[in-house]
Image: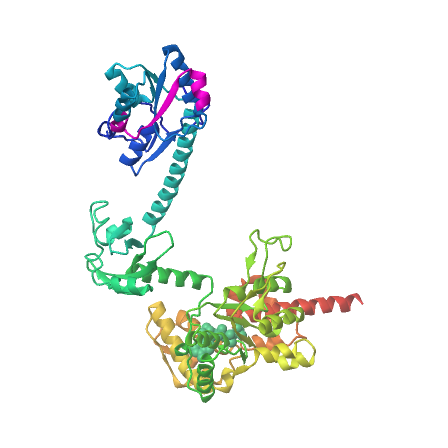
Amino acid sequence: MVKKLPQYDDVQIETTYVFGTPEVLAQNWDAEILVARGMTHDVLKELFPEKHVIRIQLSSFDIFDALVQCRHEHAKKIALCIHNIEINCLKDLEQACGASITIYDVQNEMTTEEAVSKALADGADVFVGAGTMCGICDRMGLKRIHIHTKHDAVEIAMIEALNTARTINLERARADIIRIMLNHSEEGVLAINGQGKIVNINNQAYRVFQLTTVGEVIGQPAEPLVSTVEWKDFLKNNSEKEKILRIKGKDYYVQYKPLNEEELETGALIFIRSTDRIIEEERKIRKGLSEKGLTAKYTFKDILGHSRAIRENIQMAERYSRVNSNVLIVGETGTGKELFAHSIHQASKRSNQPFVALNCAALPENLLESELFGYEAGAFSGAAKGGKVGLFELAHRGTIFLDEIGEIPIILQAKLLRVLQEKEIRRIGSTSVHPIDVRVISATNINIEEKIKEGQFRSDLYYRLNLLDITIPPLRERKEDIQELVDAYLTRFACEMGKSIPKVTPEAARLLTEHSWPGNVRELRNICERLIVLNDTDVIDAELLRQLKIFREDKCSVHAISEEEDPDSVYSRLKPKKKKKDLAEELGVSRTTLWRMAKRQSELEKKRREQQES
Ligand SMILES: Nc1ncnc2c1ncn2[C@@H]1O[C@H](COP(=O)(O)OP(=O)(O)OP(=O)(O)O)[C@@H](O)[C@H]1O
C-alpha cells in the first residue's frame, strides 16, 4: 500500500485496523511507534505517553474528495464531523457539492455521537467524517461518506515513523555501548538520584554488594547498601568525597561525585574499587615503570660508608632533596653518583613522579637529541610513525638524571640550556612547545671546568646545572669505607648464592684496603662477587686473593687504559673476545666507561691512520 519506504532490517512494520472506545484502543500494543490518524492518534497518545505516536495528517484534498462524493448521494445538507481542522474556503466547497456544509468538531467517540445527533436534529442528510463517525452512522442507518487518507499522507507519516525508529535504535546502540563499558569496568558504579534512590548500577557493583537479581535495587534507596556514607551531606554540599569502606567483609575505596548536569536530575555517581586491586595495580604500574627505567631504585639507606666525606655528602644531598634546584654530582667512575641521584629523587617531593635516567655519552648526537626532546611524526626519515615522546616529557613533574653530562655535544648544550631556562620543550619537527616541570640531576667524572676552558662546554649551561653540587671522593681517599663495603657485599652475595658468609683475615683485609680501587665501589662490588663465586671455604685470606688473582686487573683497568697514547691497551686486547657486559665486569668499569674507552680507542686509531697517510 505504501510505496518507496526506506528499508531498515531491524524495523518491523505491522498494520491493524482499530476502531472503538479508548478501552478498546488500550489493548496491549507491543509496538514502540504507533502511526494513526485523527482521534485515534490523540487517544493513543494519551493512553501511551511513553510511546512515540505519529499522526497521519488529513489533507484538505482528502476532505474535498469526500465532500464531492456527496453529490452522488443528492445531499442538501452535509454534516462534516471532523477533528480539529479549519476550513477557509467553505463557500467554494458548498458550491462544488451543491449543498450546505456545517462543521461539527469532534474529539472522541462520545463527542462524535453527540455531533451526529445534533447534525441530525439540524436536518443533515449526509454525514462526512472518519471511521468513528462512519461506525455510528452505520448503526443509526444514516448516509455517510468516509474521508479516506491518500497514500501520500500515509507515506509521509511512515517515513517519520521509520526515522524515529532509526533514532531510537541508534540511541539504544549507544546506550548498549555505555552499558557494556560500564559492565566491563573493574570499578563498581552506582548512580543515585537526588532522593538517594539507585537509578543505575553496573555488574561490578552487583558483585560488590553480592546482589543476585538484576534490577533488584533499581529505584530502591541506596542507603542500606552504602549506609556508612553520609551521601545526604555530600549531595547537599555538592562536593566530591572519598572513603575507605568495608563492604561484605572487604575493603573498598569509594568515591562520590556529584551529578548536576543540566539535563540530569541532581544526584551522584558512586565509584567503588577494591583496595586489594588498587594495590596490585599500583605494584604492576611501578613494575612497568621500573622496567622502562622510570623509577628510582635506591634511597640514602643504600649508600654505605661511614667516612666523614660520605656522611657529609649524604647530609648535603638530603638537604638538596628538599629543594628543586638542579644538582651536579662529580666523581670518578663507580663512586656512586647514580646512587646519590636516585636517593635525592626518592627523598624529594617528586618521589611519586618519574625518575628518568640517560647516559649522555652512550648515544650519538642525533639520537641523543631525539631521546631527550622527542620528535613529531614524520620529523625525519626513519622517524617512528606516531612520533616519540622525549625523556624530558616522560620526566614531567619528576627528575631527569643526565649521566656523563660532560659528553653532551656543544650543539645540544644550547638546546638543553634553552629547555632549562624556558622550562618548555619543543619536539624535533614540531612548531608548538610543551611546558615541563623537571628537576635535572647531572653527573660527570670529567672536569667540566677544563672543558669550559677548552671551549667544549658552555659555561652558562654549567652554571644552570651546577646550582647545587656534590663531589664524591674516590674510594682510595676514604679507605675507612672499604671494610664496611667489603663486609656488606660479601654478605649480600653469600646470601644470594646460598653460601656461608666468609671471614676476612686481617692480612687479606689489609690487601683490600691498600688496593687503589681504580674502579671504585663498582670494582669492589665485582671483586666481592668473584670471591663468593670462586671460593668454597669460610675464609678469605691473602693467599686466596693471590691464588684467585683478585687484583689482576689492577694494572689494566681505568688508569692503564686512560693512557691515551697506549692504543695496545688491555681494552683493545680483550674487546674482540668479549661481550660488552662481560668486558665491563672484567675491567671493573661501568658500561659507560667502556663506551668512552671505545670512543677514545677509535679516535686514536683514526688519528694513527691519518698520521700514517700524511
Ligand atoms: N657508597 C656506596 N654504597 C653502596 N654501594 C655503592 C656505593 N657507591 C657505589 N655503590 C655501588 O657501586 C656501583 C656503581 O655505582 P654508581 O653506578 O652509582 O656509580 P657512578 O659513579 O654513577 O658510576 P659511573 O660514573 O661509572 O656511571 C653500583 O652498584 C652502586 O650500587
Specify the quadrant of the image occupied by residue 160. Answer: top left
Quarter of the view holding residue 464 = bottom right
The N terminus lies in quadrant: top left
Instruction: Specify whether residue 23 is painted magenta.
Output: no
In the picture, measured across the screen, residue 444 lies left or right of residue 49, that is right
- Front residue of 442 and 306: 442
Q: Is residue 57 above or below residue 185?
A: above
Q: Is residue 108 left or right of residue 390?
A: left
**Residue 38: % across, % down:** 34, 28
Q: Residue furthest front?
A: 122
Kindly indicate the quadrant of the structure image that contains residue 61.
top left
Question: x%, y% of residue 377?
Answer: 59, 53
* Residue displayed at 66% across by 75% down: 564
Coordinates of residue 490 in the picture (x, y in percent): 38, 75
Region of the chain picked out in magenta, as a range: 91-112
Name the outermost residue toward the bottom.
308
Note whether residue 524 is visible.
Answer: no
